Image (tube, rainbow, N blue to C red):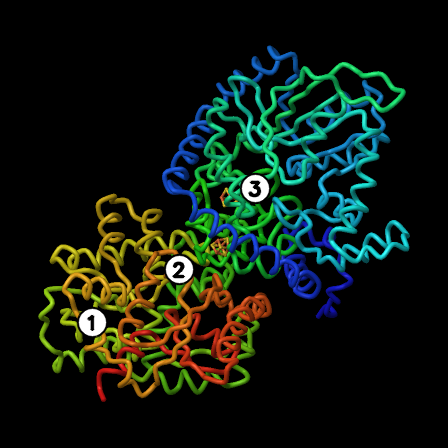
Amino acid sequence: MAAPVDPIDIQPRQVANKADKKALLEAIRMTLGVQSAAIRHNTQTFNRNRYDAVARIADYDAMKDRARGIKESAIANLPELLQQLESSVRANGGHFFLAKFAADANRYIRDVLVKHEVKLVVKGKSITSEETRLNHSLEEVGIKVAESDLAEFILQVADEQPSHIIAPALHYSRERITALFKRKFQTGLPLDTGEALTQFAREILRQQFIAADAGISGANLIAADSGSLMLVESEGNIRMTTLLPPVHIAIAGIEKVVPSRADFQPFIELLPASATGQPLTSYVSILRPPLSAASFAAPGKSTKPREFHLVLIDNGRSGMREDPILHEALYCIRCSACLNVCANFETVGGHAFGGETYSGGIGGAWEAGTGKLMNARFSELCTGCQRCLPQCPVRIDIPWVNQNLRHRINQADGASPAKSFFGSLTGSAPGDRTAPLPKQFFANYHTFGEWGSRFALLSNDSAHMPAVRTFMASVLGIDPRRELPPFPKKTWEQMFREEAQTAKASDAGVRVAMLADTFTNYGSPERGMAAVRVLRAIGVDVVLTPSIPDGRAALSQGMIDTAREHARALAKMLQPYLDSGRKIAVLEPSVLAMLRLDCKHLLDSHDLIASLAANSFEPLEMVWDTAQQQGIDLAEIFPARKSHLGTKLFYHSHCQQRTCNAASQTIDVLRAAGFDVVTSSVECCGMAGSFGYKSDYFDLSMAVGEDLIAQVRQCESDGTPRVLVTSGTSCHEQLLAGMGRVSLHPTEVLGSTLYM
Ligand code: SF4
Ligand code: SF4
């Protein structure tokens, strides 16, 4: 076994490419050890600000639709737009070059700069030039590149790749930047404040701007009809890069082209709001180069005529355009909302949750599209929590993209007799039997739940045997530090059948089929029964469906074929309930997300997809809606003062429950019943279904959970303990592991008021 790696000894560039999983695991250790505090602080600040900023946009949803529509139509018409753009740039007096590969772009730019005898070029922030490794290419022929963006300047000094798509050095604390500058510039200045560091860098950069013969910028968007560039920034350095030197080269991916300047409008608002939470960023430039104003000339030097080159790169984008999954990434406007809202990204940043250039949830698609599929292996850190789904201004289904990348990586990993045998035994679809054993285990957990519950005593006893845990760790990748939830003596189905005889008759006119999901049926049947009793207490007629696999577990492992088989069987099983006018109540939020959000990818019938999405509810969402519609006084039915638990609660809602807009109703119901509820504000507890069970990710999962635990401790710091309440099985497991405390489901809390 390899010796443990000291995280401090790993340099980000050494683990930038994570095609080999070992690099991914080393990168996680490095970032948790060195970078995590700064990343958390910075991403969570962006995230909070974004919530405030988008709430202030009156027509936010309509604006997102408009932005998505513009990008969809632009990508669909890309060949025509590129031709139009070329004509526009040439008509303006500029030069146009379409590079098939990164090396072609670098060669063209190098030739232009060599022709002009450029010795120093200033560069504004451009992630596309990171993708092509432009700096390296220019430095090979003796051209010095000065990064003018402060964060890029820091990275250039440190020789690191960006860790975030809009704030490339966000993993650096102020103290680490001070240490870096002192070491690299051998200065005795204290540099102990942000202002002092900025001032120090500014002095260096100003000299570069004055001396530079050429400037290289990126472009956020480019208008085909006029050749105009839209540049959005917060420091003003890109404006100077494009205005001061006589030669300006803009480098961008072909996906940045839109039909006209009018199409810039929604992005000018959405980009800063989604990125840093600003209503408008400090500098928005719309240029039609070459500019007519004279370029800058240092004292004693003569002004040179302006020259402009637009270098567009394909580098795999045409292939992405043809790809049914990767083409989604071409709509991305690189706002970073999906990074800042992502609990895993907030904890490790892009040096672990990222590749050589692109990072975060959408980064895998870009690394695969512009490089190799295996370079997207870091997208394993996407747990499928779906918190990024409502935040993306162009409505990209990022977890679905990542589940498909995982599917492709599973297939590329190759078959083996053991995988094939295990898959056929546990229920994997034939196309998914190349997936590693741990993935097939978690995807088919229903099978294990079924057999484990039949022999609950034996299963529970053996789960604690060292030899069994060793087997589970080595073959199934389950971390020995994680407690396994015991199998119940009676499943939810069995308990429901026994209690059905004594059930109160319905009088609310609402008829419900409760879905006996795998985790409740084989893990927490008492939670399921509490939900049944709560619904019945407000007069809802409840039946329980059979428990079958729902596809959610398979989907999260990238086993799309298995997920599709499961989803089809589930839909077939639920159809008669829907046809008879019953609504579907779903206790486990990940399964609710399956019905509301994921089935559209897995089923064929649009009517059935729409019906499942419209008629599936979280139980307390149903309680709240029924109470509102029928004027039911919840304080009368569920009087909090009668609960033996007390009235003070700390409630953490599940990530997917919030994405489904089914979380606030739980808080409303509990408060209406008279409970005093403090809520968590974290995006995800870190357990994220099977993610936290895996040895590879246990430390990351626990690190993510620290924020939630800190919030619990903070709210109890006045000495008053609160009952922990969670809506998801995994959140329950995480608090149990992190605090040693049991949490209850909201229906159990309400149930505690019924039987005094
Ligand atoms: S689904 Fe969750 S884990 Fe995946 S990228 Fe989005 S926020 Fe991150
Ligand atoms: S995928 Fe969406 S949220 Fe993420 S960076 Fe791109 S546009 Fe922003």
Q: Disc 2, disc 3: CB below 8 Å? A: no
Lateral position of residue 539 relative to residue 355, left or right = left
Indicate yes or no: mark 3 CB to ligand 2 under 8 Å: no
SS for callout 3: helix
Of circles 1 and 3, which is in front? Answer: 1
Based on the displayed image, in which of its 4 quarters is residue 124 positioned? top right
Residue at mark 3: 366
Residue 372, image x, y percentages: 60, 42
Say which quadrant the N terminus sits in.
bottom right
Expressed as whole percent of the image width and height from the top left, the position of residue 509 reads 10, 64
| Label 1, residues with CA under 10 Å away: few <14, some 14-19, many ≥20 | many
**Amino acid under label 2?**
Gln
Q: Residue at x 49, y 26 (%)?
A: 258
Q: Is residue 588 above or below residue 164?
A: below
Q: Amino acid at mark 3?
A: Trp
Residue 618 placed where, x, y %?
A: 28, 64
Q: Secondary structure at mark 1?
A: helix
At which x and y percent is residue 442? 44, 66
Vertical placement of residue 335 versus 26, above or below: above
Q: Which residue does the image show at 26% across and 60% down from the upper left?
A: 617
Q: Quadrant of the C terminus?
A: bottom left
Q: Residues within 10 Å of mark 3 (few under 14, many from 20)?
A: many
Q: Is residue 97 above or below residue 420?
A: above
Q: Which label was assigned to residue 718? A: none
Give the residue at mark 1: 535
Which kind of residue does numbered mark 1 sit on?
Leu
Determine which residue is flagged by label 2. Answer: 656
Name the residue rendered at 65%, 38% in the picture.
127
